[in-house]
Amino acid sequence: MDRHPAVSVVVPARNEASSIGRCLRGLRAQDYPPELVEILVVDDGSGDETARVAESCGVGVLRGPRRGVARARNEGIRRTRGEIVAFTDADCVPHPAWLRELTAGFDDPRVGVVAGDVLGLRLDTPVARFVEEGRFMRADALAATPGGPVAITANVAYRRRVFDLVGLFDERLRSATDMEMTWRVMRDGRFLVAWRPSAVVFHDHPRTLAEMLRQAHRWGAGGAAVHRKYGHRASLLYELEHKAWMVAAGCAVAPARALWRMTGGRRRARGAGSPLFPFLQAARTAAFAAGWIQGVLRPEGDGGWDG
């Protein structure tokens, strides 16, 4: 295909006035032919100045009522024209070479989805550093996710033809819509999913314990909902048991691991990891497990937001 295909970048946003400006400045600074780039922010019923800030950055803005992130992305797909549709989130900042590297993954005509890498933007709190060390959003980890890889919408691009043939994001899910879409493309079999770690965005990781626990709970509930949709009853029960054991084990070994870190047991280029990390891991696993239980026991309603 053309080395420089026309690209539409869709950014769903709700109440992101404080962060969307830096995201859009990063998109406007791409080393990609600007005449081939269309940027659309889909404002999902924000109660702040998200739409106004986006408009001041000189990009397209589509305002609408609060309907959920999957519907926002789908509306962005419908309202744009590019052969490639790329997605990132309002709390991300793309590297200047992001679009060039991401679209290069489509040189193989069999590829329908290209996923990039996600690095931490601000690592100024123990929680943010823990999330970065945990590699929860890194391309290599997501490509090897048990049960199936996940091309997360913080950094992914699709051929428009994929949506024409496979369908849009599942609007019935509150979260993990990117997981479900990746699985659906792979089960369909007409397109390959490729990983391009050189296509980088920087994500504003959770910086407080409460933010991290909410994120983990949401991901757990969404993951269980996707497993339930595809009839993976055995994996639902296995994961539930597995997470229970992980919570118990994490709580049991956290003090020992913290002492190990305090005494320099784990040295890296930046020094020893924080003694808090084992406790953060136990807390995150518990929140994910609680979300998984919620996802197993009851369906998620419409209008959710996982961005």
Image (cartoon, rainbow, N blue to C red):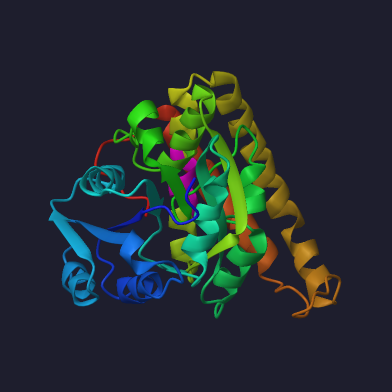
The percent coordinates of residue 168 (x first, y second) are: 33, 35
Q: 238 left or right of 229?
A: right
Quadrant into which the C terminus falls: bottom left
Regarding residue 293, the answer to whether it shows in the image is: no
Q: In this view of the protein, which residue sits in the foreground, 303 or 200?
A: 200
Q: Is residue 1 above or below residue 197?
A: above
Q: In this view of the protein, which residue sits in the foreground, 49 or 101?
A: 101
The percent coordinates of residue 183 (x first, y second) are: 51, 31
The percent coordinates of residue 129 (x first, y second) are: 61, 71
Q: Is residue 220 above or below residue 55?
A: above
Q: Residue at x 55, y 77 (%)?
A: 125
Q: Is residue 197 above or below residue 261?
A: above
Outermost residue toward the front?
Answer: 2
Picture quadrant where residue 30 is located: bottom left
What predominant SS class does the magenta segment belong to?
A: helix
Q: Residue at x 52, y 31 (%)?
A: 191
The percent coordinates of residue 112 (x first, y second) are: 49, 38
Q: Residue at x 49, y 49 (%)?
A: 152
Q: Which residues are magenta?
A: 216-222
Q: Is residue 273 above or below residue 113?
A: below
Q: 303 left or right of 251?
A: left
Picture quadrant where residue 234 is located: top right
Q: Is residue 176 magenta?
A: no
Q: 124 left or right of 273?
A: left
Q: In this view of the protein, which residue sits in the foreground, 35 or 193?
A: 35
Regarding residue 64, the answer to whether it shows in the image is: yes
